[in-house]
Image (tube, helix red, strand yellow):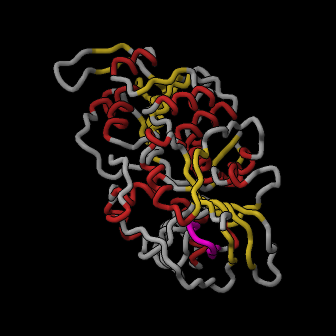
Amino acid sequence: MPNHFFSTVTPLQLREMIFKCPSGWITLKPGLCGICGSDLNLLRGSESLLLEPYASFPFILGHEIVGEIFDSPSGSEWHNGDRVVIEPLLPCDIRGVERCSFCATGNYNLCENFTAGSLPPGILTGYTKEAGGGAAQLMACHPKQLIRLPKVISDEKAVLTDSLASALQPVLNNFPGDKSTVVIYGAGITGQHVIRILRYFDSKATLVVVARYDFQKELALAGGADKVLTCPNRQALGSAINARFLPSTFDGGNLEGGAHFFFDCAGTTKSIQEGLLALRGKGQYVMIGTAAKVGPLDISSLWFRELQITGSSCYGNTKLNGQSIHTYSKAVEILSHEHYNTAGLLSHTFSLDKYKDAFSAAFNKDRYRSVKIALDMRTP
């Protein structure tokens, strides 16, 4: 994938626009707005063409938002100056339509009405033309999107909520046993959160992380990884997970008896292929990093080892210790605890007028040692 941002050939620009807040919504003043991997995929042109119906142009980018209430309707529970994060999903309740079967059961991340109701099509704030995103001085949000921030959480921690929630949902849905071997493939912000979430919930599983850069390796070890490999070949990965390497005439060899879980935080042809081969029989492959089209894959392990494959879309409600929890709120709670190690995860902030520099840093991780990049609307 390209690791440079060419501002002259992307449809991204800084403009003045007339701000309108829908009736019953709340005006928010964004403070920090994180740049997400999905934003980068959009600018690369690598998002799924089949997801086109789930967005509407033009839109103001940004859905990883921390800010404060600027103006709220009379009688609202919210007051000017309240600090909040925004859960950016736009399901049935926010669109003003009758709840679909998924929303009715709390699985609103799988809403069937992202193209219906009072809003133009869009899964998230920041991808629909009438629910502008957080890369702006003001934005409108539905009261049901707001989550209050405790005073102990700084803006710099709070802007990690969305990326943490995106990792928390699949980890809790696919939590490994203490004797499991787990591969976390990809050590960007999502992979870093997966490591830390597992250790936060006292997982004793062996965590083997595949990183692309040395600085990611350092962060992974600081977060609790047992082993970190930088761009390993298949034989090296197999050795790290105590799998036998079986040479083959073509396609680089096979692995036998490897990991119990494979959290794919990259979503590339290579990561999917290595995941299918690194898992032992009945192993669980979890796609967290989004992918659209991928290249040729050998999927023989899927049937040969009876693997289980699942995806994960954003966040909603999940289970923890048998109890239903709201994933986004739980992410805020986790960030309020000092022993959740966020050091180094927010690597850079840029003022809004420096958005070109921000996206350059987000694309070129090696040069900038970037993890999470955020636009800072707090600066004049």
Location of residue 154 with respect to 198 vertically, above or below: below
Residue 42 relative to residue 78: left or right: left
- Verify whether residue 32 appears in magenta: no
Residue shown at 34% from the left, 52% from the top: 292
Q: Position of residue 239 (x, y in %)?
A: 41, 15
Q: In front here: 279 or 351?
A: 351
Residue 202 relative to residue 98: left or right: right
Q: Could you tell me how many numbered marks the image carries?
A: 0
Q: Looking at the rendering, in which quadrant would you find the C terminus?
A: bottom right
Q: In front here: 248 or 220?
A: 220
- Verify whether residue 139 appears in magenta: yes
Residue shown at 64% from the left, 60% from the top: 32
Residue 350 in which image quadrant: bottom right
Which residues are drawn in magenta?
Answer: 134-141
Q: Position of residue 115 (x, y in %)?
A: 45, 74
Residue 263 at least partly seen: yes
Q: Position of residue 128 (x, y in %)?
A: 48, 73
Residue shown at 63% from the left, 83% from the top: 21
Residue 108 at least partly seen: no
Residue shown at 58% from the left, 67% from the top: 134
Q: In front here: 107 or 62?
A: 62
Residue 177 relative to residue 330: left or right: left
Location of residue 18 with respect to 180 vertically, above or below: below
Q: In front here: 267 or 304?
A: 267
